[in-house]
Image (cartoon, rainbow, N blue to C red):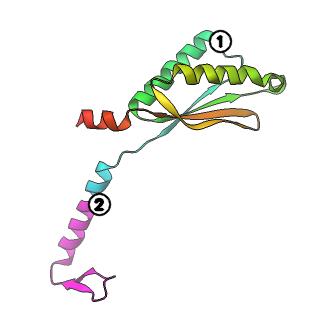
């Protein structure tokens, strides 16, 4: 005898094979997990003095991560006297936000935390891509 709905005012029970009942429950849980979409967070780091080539290279990586459906956290690290020129990091961040507007949108606005300026991007067409693949 297996209790099916224990929370009801009158508990519902059935007489069946307990091992088979456990097997069916595990099978249902696997199906639910298979249908879930896991979104990883990737991090890309810049400095205010990042060269043009490095900037373009990292921007391409960010676009690829967004196309794959991952979140991307972009962080600009300030070291030593670079803290005096915070506006360089902000202009780099604004440029990046403008250029990535086609691939992703901002999930968390640019925020200054200690010696870091960070922003989080999420992909625009996650649901559209998922339906297109099926």
Q: Quadrant of residue 5?
A: bottom left
| Left or right placement of residue 81 versus residue 126 in this view | right
35, above or below 5, in the image: above
The span picked out in magenta is 1-29
At x 16%, y 78%, the residue is 17
| Left or right placement of residue 93 versus residue 39 in this view | right
38, above or below 18, in the image: above
Q: Which mark is residue 93?
A: none
Residue on which the image places disc 2: 29
Q: CA distance from mark 2 to mark 1?
A: 49 Å
Is disc 1 surrounded by few (<14), some (14 to 19) or many (20+) residues within 10 Å? few
How far across and down, in percent of the image, does residue 50 sit?
67, 16
How far across and down, in percent of the image, does residue 92 sit?
65, 20
Q: Is residue 8 magenta?
A: yes
Looking at the picture, tell me which residue is in the foreground, 19 or 109: 109
How far across and down, in percent of the image, does residue 53 sit?
58, 10
At x 51%, y 23%, the residue is 100
Q: Secondary structure at mark 1?
A: loop
């Amino acid at each position: 005898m297996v209790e099916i709905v224990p929370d009801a005012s009158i508990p519902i029970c059935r007489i069946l094979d307990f091992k088979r009942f456990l097997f069916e429950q595990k099978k249902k849980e696997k199906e639910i997990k298979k249908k879930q979409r896991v979104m990883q967070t990737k991090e890309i780091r810049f400095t205010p003095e990042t060269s043009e080539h490095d900037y373009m290279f990292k921007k391409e990586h960010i676009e690829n991560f967004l196309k794959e459906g991952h979140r991307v956290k972009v962080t600009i690290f300030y070291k030593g006297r670079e803290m005096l020129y915070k506006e360089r990091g902000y202009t780099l961040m604004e440029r990046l936000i403008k250029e990535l507007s086609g691939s992703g949108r901002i999930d968390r606005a640019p925020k200054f935390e200690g010696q870091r300026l960070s922003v989080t991007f999420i992909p625009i067409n996650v649901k559209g891509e998922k339906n297109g693949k099926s």
